[in-house]
C-alpha cells in the first residue's frame, strides 16, 4: 500500500509540472553568418566601427571580422576607405554635425551590409540647477534634483541624459586607489512628464532617453532625480546628448534587454527582447549623436 501511495504522489507531481509548462515561440536568427556592426559616432571624432560575424544559437565563439573592406560615404559621396586599428575599423576623416554617413561593408563569402545615420545638431545646455535633498526613497536614500534648461529645435528630436560622478578628493587620509574614482549614481523617483512619457523607467536605465513630443520647438526645463551613496564632495558631469532616431530606438530596446537579463525563473521570466538594428544585410547598430555637458561640484552636507 505504501509503495502504491508513492506512485500516486509521483504521478500527481508529474501532472502538476506538466500543467505549469508554457510554450514560448522564439524567433531564432538565421544560422548563415551575417556581418555585425557596432558603432556610435559623434562630431569632431573619427568614426570607429567594430565588426564581427553572427553565430548560431548553439555556438559560443564570437568571431571578429578582420577581412572586411569598409567604404564610408558622406551625404552619399564616397570619401574614405576605413583602416584597421586596435580591433576597430577607423576613418581618416572626422565626422561633422548635420551630415549623413553611410557604410558599405564587404566581406568575402558573406552578404554585403549597408547602414547610414546622421549626427544631429548639438543642443546647448543653457543652465543647470542642482538642488540637494528634495526627497527620500523607501530605502532611506536622499534624492537630489538636477534641472536642465535648453532650447529645442523644430521637428522631431531625440535626447539622452547621462550623469557621471567623479571623486576629486586630494586627502592624505584617503588611499590613492580610492581617489579619482567614479561615483555610483542611480536614478530614482523621476516624475517629470518628459521623462515618464517614455515608459522606460521600470527598466532601471543607466541613462534617460526622451523625445521632444511635449515641447517641440520650445524651451524645455526638465527635472531629473537621482541619488548616490557617496559621503564626500564630488564633481557631477551632466551630459545632454542629441541623438539620432536610430540611436534612440536602439537604447529603447537595449534597456528592456538588459533588464530581462536580471530576471530568472525565481524572480519572474521576462519576454524575449529583440534588439533594434539599422543594418541592412546584417545586424547591429550604426548611430550618431552630438553632446553638450557641464560639470558642477556637489558638496556633501555632513
Image (cartoon, rainbow, N blue to C red):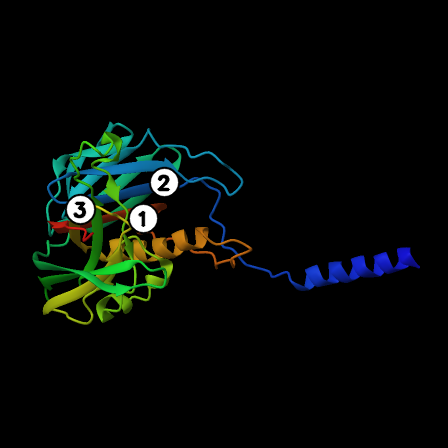
Q: Quadrant of residue 63?
A: top left
Q: Is residue 26 visible?
A: yes
**Where does label 3 land, which residue?**
233
- The spot of residue 101 in percent (x, y) is 18, 46
**Where 167 falls versus 157 (above or below)?**
above
Marks 3 and 1 sit apart, C-alpha to C-alpha, by 44 Å
**Where 135 falls versus 272 (above or below)?**
below
For image coordinates 77% across by 62% down, the residue present is: 12
Mark positioned earlier in the residue sequence (1 or 2) = 2
For image coordinates 49% across by 50% down, the residue present is: 28
Residue at the extreme right of the image, as rendered? 1
- The spot of residue 90 in percent (x, y) is 21, 33
**Where does label 1 land, which residue?**
279
Residue at the extreme left of the image, as rendered? 126
Left or right of residue 64, residue 72 in this image = left
Q: Residues within 10 Å of mark 1 (few under 14, many from 20)?
A: some
Give the camera-side residue of 114 and 208. Answer: 208
Q: Is residue 155 visible?
A: no
**Where does label 2 land, which residue?**
35
Marks 1 and 2 sit apart, C-alpha to C-alpha, by 9 Å
Give the camera-side residue of 1 and 104. Answer: 1
For image coordinates 31% across by 32% down, the residue present is: 68
Amino acid at each position: 500500500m505504501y509503495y502504491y501511495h508513492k506512485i500516486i504522489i509521483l504521478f500527481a507531481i508529474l501532472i502538476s509540472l506538466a500543467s505549469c509548462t508554457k510554450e514560448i515561440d522564439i524567433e531564432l536568427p538565421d544560422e548563415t553568418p551575417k556581418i555585425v556592426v557596432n558603432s556610435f559616432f559623434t562630431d569632431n571624432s573619427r568614426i570607429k566601427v567594430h565588426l564581427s560575424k553572427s553565430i548560431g544559437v548553439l555556438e559560443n565563439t564570437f568571431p571578429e571580422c578582420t577581412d572586411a573592406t569598409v567604404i564610408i560615404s558622406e551625404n552619399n559621396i564616397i570619401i574614405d576607405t576605413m583602416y584597421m586599428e586596435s580591433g576597430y575599423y577607423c576613418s581618416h576623416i572626422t565626422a561633422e554635425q548635420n551630415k549623413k554617413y553611410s557604410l558599405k561593408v564587404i566581406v568575402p563569402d558573406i552578404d554585403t551590409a549597408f547602414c547610414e545615420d546622421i549626427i544631429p545638431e548639438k543642443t546647448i545646455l543653457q543652465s543647470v540647477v542642482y538642488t540637494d535633498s528634495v526627497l527620500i526613497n523607501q530605502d532611506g536614500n536622499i534624492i537630489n534634483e538636477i534641472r536642465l534648461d535648453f532650447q529645442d529645435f523644430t521637428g522631431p528630436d531625440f535626447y539622452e541624459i547621462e550623469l557621471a560622478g567623479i571623486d576629486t578628493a586630494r586627502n592624505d587620509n584617503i588611499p590613492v586607489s580610492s581617489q579619482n574614482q567614479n561615483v555610483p549614481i542611480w536614478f530614482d523617483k523621476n516624475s517629470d512628464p518628459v521623462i515618464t512619457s517614455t515608459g522606460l523607467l521600470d527598466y532601471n536605465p543607466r541613462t534617460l532617453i526622451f523625445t521632444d513630443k511635449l515641447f517641440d520647438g520650445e524651451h524645455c526645463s526638465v527635472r531629473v532625480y537621482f541619488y548616490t551613496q557617496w559621503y564626500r564632495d564630488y564633481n557631477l558631469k551632466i551630459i545632454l546628448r542629441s541623438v539620432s532616431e536610430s540611436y534612440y530606438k536602439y537604447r529603447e530596446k537595449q534597456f528592456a534587454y538588459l533588464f530581462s537579463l536580471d530576471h530568472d525563473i525565481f524572480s519572474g521570466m521576462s519576454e524575449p527582447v529583440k534588439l533594434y538594428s539599422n543594418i541592412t544585410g546584417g545586424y547591429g547598430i550604426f548611430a550618431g549623436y552630438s553632446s553638450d555637458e557641464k560639470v558642477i561640484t556637489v558638496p556633501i552636507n555632513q
